[in-house]
Amino acid sequence: MIINEKMCVDAWKKALKYILDEGTDFTDTDDRQCREVLNFMVNIEQPEKDYDKLIYMMKQFEWIYPTSEELSAIIFNKEDLAIYEYSYGPRIFNFSGMKDQINDYVIPLLKNDPHSRRAVISLFNPSTDSDVLNKNVPSLMFIHFKIKNNELTCTCFIRSNDFFIGWPGNVYQIYLLQKYVADKLNIKTGALSTMSCSAHIFHEHFEHVEKLK
Amino acid sequence: MRDTEEIILNVFKNHSTKELNTEFLAREIYPQEYSHIENLMRGTDKVHIHDAKRQKFQLHRKLLYYINKLIDSKIIKVAKIAEKGEKYFILQAGEGDTIIEKGYKKIVISKPALTSTHMDQYESKEVMKKYEEDSWINRFNSIMLECIKIPDIDRLYGLIIECFTNINDAVALNEFENILNISDDKALKDFINKIAKDTENSGKTISIIVNLSQTNNNIHEFIDYYAGVNPKKINIIFNLSNKDLQKHAKILEHIIEKFSDSKIKINFKNNDLSSAPYFKGRAGIYNFDEKDWNIYNMKFKGNVVCVSCSQSQVAININRFFEVYRTDTEFRQAILDAAKTLLMANTIQRRKSNEYFRNINNINYPNSADFYKFSRDYIRFWNYDWHKDITENHNLFELIQSTKELIDNFCYSEETIFKSCGVPIRFKIAFSSAFRNFDQKFMGERDYKKFTVNKVEDYYNIEIKDFLHIREKMFEIFDGGDRLRIFRKSDFIMADILHELGIILSAYKIPFFTYDFSGLKGTVKLTSFM
C-alpha cells in the first residue's frame, strides 16, 4: 500500500484512516491490542511545508511529547549516554564509536557522485541488536538519500512503527536530517518517504485517532 | 555584597525553586518591622491602620531597591506579575549549583531542576509531596548492590559509601551471605559499626538481604552482634520459603530470640511468592518487578555490581486529598499529573546522567547501561487504609487499581513515543504504600488498625483471616511492594512463632512481612520458648 500526499499532516491522517479501516488486529508481545498493516509506504512530496506541525498536533493529547529541541538533540547528539542502550544520534554520527555516517560518508559520496544509489546509513547494529533477549532495538533501521531533479529525497525503513504517536516524531527527525544533508550539498530537500514494515495503532489510541479526523 | 542582598539570597537559597512574592520576602527579611506592621493592621484604630499601610509600602519599596539590584546583576528575575501588580521573583540561575560572588562574599545555591511541574497545585494544597525535594532529581532513591560481584567486605563498604553520594534513601545488599560466609568476626563487627554510624549521619538506610538457606555458621555471630548494636537505620531481610522453616528452625529460633529481646523488627520475604528482592527504605518498601527480575537473572546478573531500583518518587496523602478534592476523576487526574512530573524528572536525569551518576557508571563499566534497565519510579500512598475497618476501603482499592491501569498505559505510551523517536527510555511507575518517614510533617499521624497477634490461634479467627485476604489484594495492587506488619504481643514459645510464620508463608499470598516485637514487655527469656 502506498499513500501519496503533498503535506505531512494530510499523509498522516490518510495513513491513520487506512490502518483503522483496513488493518488487522493482533496482540503484541506486551499483551497490547494493535491494528496493523504490513509493508506500508507513505510518500510526502513537500515535507518542508509542515513537518513540524505534527509535533504541535501531538501536544493536544494527555501525553508528554518530546519537545522539538529534544527531538532534534536525539538525532544530532553524537554523545553516547550510559543511560541509553542506544540513541539515534550516536548511531548516525558515531556508529560503534568509529563512523560518522553522514559527514564522512553520505555527504562526500553525494558530492562526488550525485547519481549515487549507495547513500544509505544504518542505525541497526547486528552485533548488539541481534539478540533474542534485547527488546531495545532501533525501530528506524536505515535511511537512504538520493538526489533527484537536484533535490535531496530521503527514504527510511522502519521495522515497527506506531503510526499514531511515533510517526510524527520520526518524520520530524528525518526531515531535520534530510535538511542537514541538503544544506551541506547546497540543494533543496525533496520528497520524504517512510516504509513501515509494521504500521500499527494501539487500540487504546483509537478514540484519539478518531478526534484527528 | 551588601548585607541585605546577602539576606535576600539566603532566603532564595532556602527556596531555590520557588517563586517568592514581595510580601513573603519582606516578612523574611525584615521580620521585626513586618511583625510591628501586622500588629497595627490587626487593630481597629483607623489612624494606626493607615500608618501601617504607609509603613508597609515603604518597607516594600526599600526591599525592591535591593531586589532590583539583584535583578540587574542577573541573579534573580521577575517570574510573574499577579493580580494587583504584585511581583513574584525567582532565581535566574539554571539547575545545579550556582556560586554567586559579589565583592568578597560568596553564596552557593543548589537549585534542582524542574521549577514548575504538573504536581504544583497538589503540592500547594499539601496533598502530594516529592521525596527529598532538593535531591529528587540528581539522586536515585534506592540502589541494590550485588554482593556476589564484590570480592570482600572492605570493598563492599567502599561501594556503599560511593553509592550514598548517589541516593537519597536506601541501599540494599543482595545475597549478603556471599560476604558473610567469607568474612571473619572482627571484619563483620567493624562493618556493622561503620555502616551504623554512616546511616545515622547521613539519614540513609541499608537493607541487608540474607538467604537463610545459603548461610554458614557466621550467621550466629553476625546476628548476635547486630542485635547488640541494634542500628536503627539498618534492616535485615531474611529470604526464606516454607520448607526452609523446618530445615533452618534452629537459626530462626536464634534470630527470633535475639531480635525480640532487642525489640528489633524481623523482616521476611517469601521466596515461594517472589524471587525478586524486597527491601526497606525511609520512604517505604522497594522491590523489583518479578518479570524484570527473571530477565535480569537470565541475561544481566553477573554483569553489574549495582542496579537501580527507584529513580524518583512522590507520595499522596489520600484522606487529605479527598478533603480537598471530591471525585474519582480528580484522583485519577492527580495521579496522572504525578506520573507526568516523574517523567519530566526522568528526562532531566537522562540528560544529565553522565554528570549526576558518573561514579555509578564507572562502577558498572563496561556494562553501565545495565544499571538503569530495571529502575522504576514510585507513587506512594499514605492513609490508603483510612477507614478504620479496612473492609470499608473496598471502593478506594478499586479506584487505586483502575488508576494503576491508567498509569501503566500512560507509561507504555510514553515509552513508545520516546522509543519511536530514538530514545529507548525505561519509564515504569510502581505503586506502593508510604512510610511515615517519607516526610513526617507532610504525612501527619496515621490512623489505622494495627494487626496484632497475641497467640497462634488468632490466625484462625475469621476477622483476621478477612484482614489478611484484604492485605493479599493490596499486595497485588501495590506492584512496587508492600509490607504487612504484625505486632506480636504476649509471651510465646518458639514453636508458636515458627507455626505462625508457617501459616503466613504457606496460606497467604503475602510476599513481605515484618514481625514487630515492640509490644512485648520485658525481655524474652529462653525459658519462655520452652
Image (cartoon, rainbow, N blue to C red):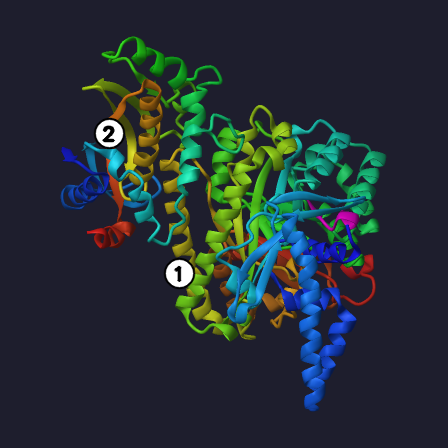
- In the image, is A128 to the left or to the right of B249? left
Asked if residue B409 is among those painted magenta in the image, a careful observer would answer no
Q: Residue at x 72, y 86 (%)?
A: B48
On the same chain, marks 1 and 2? The answer is no
Q: Residue at x 66, y 67 (%)?
A: B24
Q: Chain of mark 2?
A: A
Q: Disc 1 to disc 2, how far (Cα)?
A: 42 Å
Identify the element where label 2 is drawn: strand
Q: Is residue B41 visible?
A: no
Position in image of residue A164 (x %, y %): 27, 44
- In the image, is A80 to the left or to the right of B441? left
Residue sitting nearer the eye, B7 or B400: B7
The residue type indicated by label 1 comes to Ser
- Report the disc number at residue B402: 1
The answer to which quarter of the image holds residue B420 is top left
Residue sitting nearer the eye, A73 or A194: A73
In this rendering, is residue B387 above or below A188?
A: below
Residue sitting nearer the eye, B369 or B505: B369
Position in image of residue A180 (x %, y %): 36, 25
In this rendering, is residue B92 above or below B26?
A: above
Position in image of residue A5 (x %, y %): 16, 36
Foreground mark, 1 or 2? 2
- In the image, is B419 to the left or to the right of B152? left
* Label 2 sits on residue: A192
Q: Which residues are magenta?
A: B199-207
Q: Is residue B46 visible?
A: yes
Identify the element where label 1 is drawn: helix
Tell me whether circle 1 and circle 2 mark residues in contact (CB < 8 Å): no
